[in-house]
Image (cartoon, helix red, strand yellow):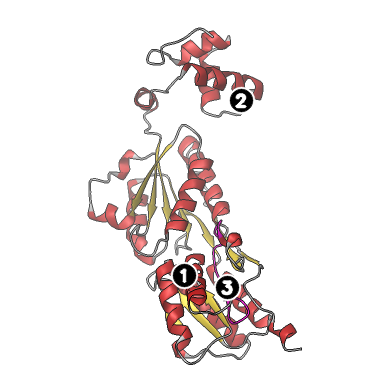
Amino acid sequence: MKKVDKRTATIRTIARMAGVSHTTVSRALNGSPLVKPKTRDKITEIAKEIGYVPNMSAKSLVTNRSYMIGIFFTNLDTGTSASFLTDVIEQAQGMLPRSYLLSINSIEYAMDNKSVAIINFDGVIVISQSKTDDEFIEYVHQVGLPMVVLNRVIERDDIYNYAIGDKLGSKMATEYAIRMGHRRLALISGLASFESAAQRTKGFREALSEHQLTVADELMMQGDYRPKSGSRLMRKILSSGNLPTCVICENDDMAVGAINTCVELGYKVPRDISIIGFDDMAYSKYLNPPLTTIRKPTSTIIEMGIARLVNIIENGKPEQVEQKVIDPEIIVRSSVLNLNLSNE
């Protein structure tokens, strides 16, 4: 193939080389389904070989769009685990059309710093973890930007909202432990200000109540969703003098810390103490033992949210606003001992 200077290469350059119109090239590079797969592959290969780099500034001027999507988390410093943050960003990048770029910020920072000009975004994704986000959500809504709110159920019906059944997931984890014969349970909960923690604790208590069980105060621990807090609080549980048979952690990161402390202090999981997590992070099945956990449908809500947001950006907001809560599922592995069998 004849060498082409990528600094001067344009869509028309690719069109000449591929023998198609520049409109077809533009559609192909933007992932349009109107272009046949064979033609799209040919155009993509030519673009790659000549090192074509789209001029986003020129494209923005023509379309009056920035091709920037803002993702806002409640807080990037406290409560949002590194695993969850990475998981969300990777999935969002993989699901967005290639023409879009991401900007990651915290709601707290955006509200305190007017330099974060949300008006420059084509759309906004809010990964909401707290009711304190409602002020920011209302602000974006008033500005009129396309927006979807993910992760938390919001108490309004005029914004697209895809959330996770946190209470149900925690209840499922607790009921599983009870079915496995566990009656002395402990809880390592998440950050108190996060709605996910409140809902997961509610599910835990609800399951206990339905089975006429109680939990000792010294076995109810308040963590912050990070491995270090799981480790520290498991140490307190193990030294409480009231050893539970199963500890439920409100996310996998704290479960990792809890397992690590058990190993350090000579307790075997699950022979001496069982542990259940929440999230089903990618590493959970590789732990020793593999972690029984609740699979949080993060990829599902992100896929639904991004598809909806891009559709709003490109086609306008439809009359019917969609809101859904996606149920989690329990993933049974090897970190919970079946006491029913061991007592036979």
Residue 283 in view here: yes
In the picture of the structure, the residue carrying the numbered disc 3 is 276
Q: Amino acid at mark 2?
A: Leu
Q: Secondary structure at mark 1?
A: helix
User: In the rendered structure, which segment of residues is drawn in magenta?
Assistant: 269-283
**Marks 1/2: CA–CA distance:** 50 Å
Q: Residues within 10 Å of mark 3 (few under 14, many from 20)?
A: many
Give the foreground label among 3 and 1: 1
Give the foreground label among 2 and 3: 3
Dot placed on the residue nearer the N-terminal end, 1 or 2: 2
Percent coordinates x, y for residue 289 in the rendering: 61, 68
Q: Residues within 10 Å of mark 1 (few under 14, many from 20)?
A: many
- Disc ID at residue 294: none
- Disc ID at residue 34: 2
Mark 1 and mark 2 residues within 8 Å of each other at the beta carbon: no
Percent coordinates x, y for residue 295 in the rendering: 59, 62
Dot placed on the residue nearer the N-terminal end, 3 or 1: 1
Q: Main secondary structure of the magenta part?
A: loop
The residue at the point 38 percent across, 52 percent down is 72
Residue that protrudes farthest toward the right in the picture: 344
The correct choice, above or below, for 340 with respect to 73 in the image is: below
